[in-house]
Amino acid sequence: MVKRDISYLNNVDVSEIKGFGEKRIKSLNKSGIKSIVDLIRFFPRKHIDRSSILTIEEVRNLFEIKEITILVEINDVSVFTTRSRLRIATLTVKDDTGAAKAKWFGPQYIETRFKAGDTVAISGIPDIKKTGSVEFKNGTIEKYLDSDELNETGALIPIYKKIEGLSSSLIRKGIKHALKRAPEINDYLHPDQLKLYSLVNRTKSFNDIHFPENLNEYYEAKKRLAFDEFLYLQTIFKKKKAIDKQKTGSEKINSENKLINKFTQNLDFELTKAQHRTINEILKDMNKNSPMKRLLQGDVGSGKTIVAASAVYAVINSGFKAALMAPTEVLAEQHFNSLNPILQKYKIKTYLLTSSVKDRSEMIEQMTSSEPVFFIGTHALIQESISFNNLGLAIIDEQQRFGVDQRRKLIESSNIVPHQIVMTATPIPRTTALAVYGDLDISIIDELPPGRKQIENILLSGLEDDNNAVVDHCIQHLEKNSQIFIVCPYIDESENKDIKAAEKVYKQYENLFPHNNVELLHGRMKSEEKEAIMERMNESKIDILVSTVVIEVGIDIPNATLMIIESAERFGLNQLHQLRGRVGRGSKKSQCIFHISSKLDMSSITDVGNKRLNAIVSTNDGFKLSELDLQIRGEGKVTGTDQSGLSDLKIADLRYDFDILNNSKIFFEKELTEELEEKIYNEAILLFPNFVKTEDTT
Ligand code: ADP
Ligand code: MG
């Protein structure tokens, strides 16, 4: 038999398949199905089990009522219209063991499609009367010629996404024909490899994903197809990276050890091994004319900022500008406050640009000058009117909070192509990162600075006893002269409601602790006001700081040892982890209380809410949490962007397919020859054009 390549089949038009008229071809085309490959890759959403075919006698004695199929001959067809004009079609049917009835309510025209003497298969959940009579209501019926032709009954029936203008039975038939048209599909994996990686061959995978004999066959098919998709991803990203490496337009940054040591050896603390390693990775990468695109990931508090600052130091010493963009004003200000004093020692000028900076004339002048200076800011950095002269390095902090366009804008706002560092505190395991961040090189800080104490997690309900326990915890921390963060419910996108909620909590704590200094912080405050509050918090002049989620990212106050998250069930897992990371930064023991909304307990919140809260208290490890998050939420939300084309994966699912992904990575590293890679790549660009198209600025 001739084996066909996917690329060959991709050129065979669906119109060549039996049974589709012109109109239906149009409908298929509209749904993006143009070739045979499109059709066999139109994977079912699920299967319904109609595999048990019983005799009428067996149905009568059915122990447990479930969906079954009978093979019968039609005795009689009748139609009856009720007074309320409901049409009821009744078939009387029989097999060797007895007789049964099947009824259809409504205009299904059963009587025109079937006649006495026809052999049919009927599937459904039977009604079994005490008298022993068997009746089906609105079952699925089809003519039975020989068992091969059974499409909708007597098997695991694939269910597809609706295509306008085509019945599901027609889709099934079409796919069957398409599979017959391609009886053997070339497999790029050798039989030995299939065995080694426990995979079924391609032909089988395509057949069984639609028409499995049993569920196990279906899972094996799915596994193989997911494996292929992960291989596609990897080849595409590898190519993309190779192409990126050939690009030029960036400036070579001096990365001599002597230079950078001067900076790193004069900090207030010793860098961790992981920080040293990532700094080296970055410097080595920037010492080229091809633009670096590097993802710097590390758990909350792992010390990403100083790694980025080391890169800034090197870039400025080579005579270029650097810019760091953060998602909130509070965070940009904090970066400015912590980095400016360090960089000043080396006469490096640092500017802070946020939307509350009114007089920008000096800054704009600096941006367009040839001076090597450093800008820290928010979205204000990417306003239309602003462009940089000689921006050698662009850093994006908390990248998950920015859209692709915003990141691109910063990159494109310069006359040269800057090197890029994107930082994220949504750490994900390296294997998964490959799929999520694709074409970025990755540096991981997998070590926390020494002396960090584990944060103790406490989950409390909104019932009275637990509310009192929250107050008791506060008292204990205040007695040790420690400070407390209280983060208020995240209501929705409108900050106004969040502020109202925060004001309420603020009043409550003011009343509870009249002798302590309780203050309120929210995003609508003037920037000087916010800064003053953070400053007072830093100087331990505030005992309890009540805030909206503006506090979420990056804030760093070592003497704060208690974090209380109100209405914790409303927050996302990553948000909870970020918030918790605001404490546990000093030498004192810290606690984080996840406090459920007033009057609620675990049993009254959603399943997903339960899962998230259980996950967050189970571990402080951000890498583990992101894995759990994937499972709870699904992969699309993790990146929050469309950058990787992940949503185009048809079969593979990062929530469940870690093992397959891992295996495919091992395969990719061990078994890939140039020839094989080329084959996989060619298929990949055919099947996933969007992966290739995705813009490459991130
Ligand atoms: P994140 O990775 O969450 O952005 P930061 O860069 O804000 O973390 O660092 C958290 C805190 O840890 C800061 O106060 C920083 O000065 C401090 N820090 C960073 N690296 C070290 C280190 N090697 N030793 C001690 N403290 C460090
Ligand atoms: Mg940070």
Image (cartoon, grey):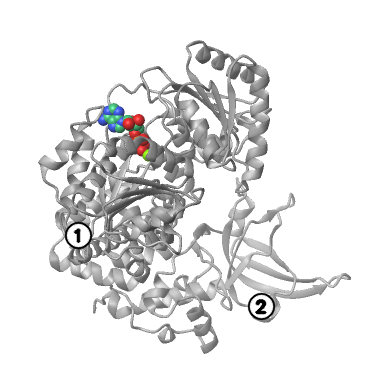
Tell which tag, 2 or 1, sits nearer the viewer.
1
Q: Three-letter amino acid code at disc 2?
A: Ala
Residue 677 x %, y %: 19, 65
184 or 40: nearer the viewer: 40
Of all residues, the one furthest to the bottom in this rendering is: 22
512 or 197: nearer the viewer: 512
Mark 1 Cβ inside 8 Å of ligand 1: no
Calculate the distance from the C-alpha at mark 2 to the C-alpha at mark 1.
83 Å
Whether residue 656 is visible to the viewer of this picture, yes or no, is no
Tag shown at residue 251: 1
Tag shown at residue 634: none
Residue at point 48% right, 47% down? 633
Residue 387 x %, y %: 37, 62
Quarter of the image for the N terminus: give it: bottom left
Residue at point 35% right, 66% down? 695
Alpha-carbon neighbours of circle 1 within 10 Å: few (<14), some, or many (≥20)? many
Q: Is residue 235 above or below residue 452?
A: below
Q: Is residue 602 above or below residue 214?
A: above
383 vs 523, left or right, is: left
Element under disc 1: loop
